[in-house]
Image (tube, helix red, strand yellow):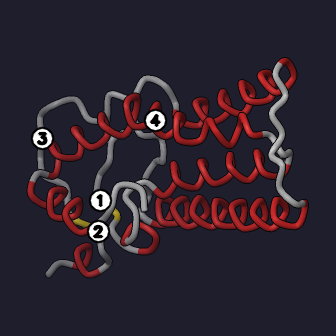
Amino acid sequence: MNDGAQRGILPAMTNSEPDGAAVRLPPPLVFLGALVLGAVIQTFAPLRLELPFALRAGGALFAGAAGVALLAGALSLFRRTGQDPKPWEPTPEIVSTGIYRFTRNPMYVGMALLLLALGLAFANAWIVALVPTVLAVVYWTAVRHEEAYLERKFGAAYEAYKARTRRWL
């Protein structure tokens, strides 16, 4: 087993195709757009979360902390392995340690949890309701392109990683 495989990093396969996933819409903009859209809708059609403050605050703190932890863990692993977190940039290796043992998309899950936390914190039911929609949009605009790229580039190694690690949670 090579040093990279021992660290949970699968080696890249050589490929003459252009390198990088065909992601044209940066996923953070999708999450930010949902936040703005939820706030605008709330202005014209208020829909407050009618939950006790303690429940909303606790949920917001938990979701926010979990979101920050996922994002920080994923970004830390990317930095340590010299990778760029932008999905359209080349991926030299598959990181499968740390948070990537549990989810293939910790950054997107983390952003979804932060969006949920903001919706709870502001009692904005529109923002909370947009979370599943945002994940669907991110799937169609980014995740499926990233997965296709990684399957082409890493073949069986990525297929094995997919078989043992969930897409979201």
Mark 4 vs mark 3: which is more N-terminal? 3
- Classify residue 67 by image quadrant: bottom right
Question: Mark 3 and mark 1: span between their CA atoms?
Answer: 15 Å
Disc 2 to disc 1: CB gap under 8 Å: yes
Mark in front: 1 vs 4: 4
Mark 2 vs mark 1: which is more N-terminal? 2
Residue 83's spot in the image, x, y percent?
43, 53
Q: Is residue 58 left or right of residue 116?
A: right
Mark 2 vs mark 3: which is more N-terminal? 2
Question: Mark 4 and mark 2: span between their CA atoms?
Answer: 25 Å
Element assignment for label 4: helix
Whether residue 22 is situated above or below residue 57 in the rendered picture: above
Residue visible at 37% across and 58% down in the picture? 104
Residue 86's spot in the image, x, y percent?
47, 40
Residue visible at 19% across and 57% down in the picture? 158
Whether residue 168 is situated above or below residue 42 in the rendered picture: below
Q: Residue furthest top?
A: 44
Estimate how packed mark 1 is, as few (under 14), some (14 to 19) or many (20 or more) residues with alpha carbons within 10 Å.
Answer: many
Mark 1 vs mark 4: which is more N-terminal? 1
Q: Tell me, for residue 94, which label it has, or none.
A: 1
The residue wearing badge 4 is 138
Q: Tell me, for residue 15, which label it has, or none.
A: 3
Mark 3 vs mark 1: which is more N-terminal? 3
Mark in front: 4 vs 2: 4
The residue wearing badge 2 is 9
Q: Residue furthest front?
A: 50
Q: Is residue 1 left or right of residue 8?
A: left
- Classify residue 59 by image quadrant: bottom right
Q: Tell me, for residue 17, which label it has, or none.
A: none
Disc 3 to disc 1: CB gap under 8 Å: no
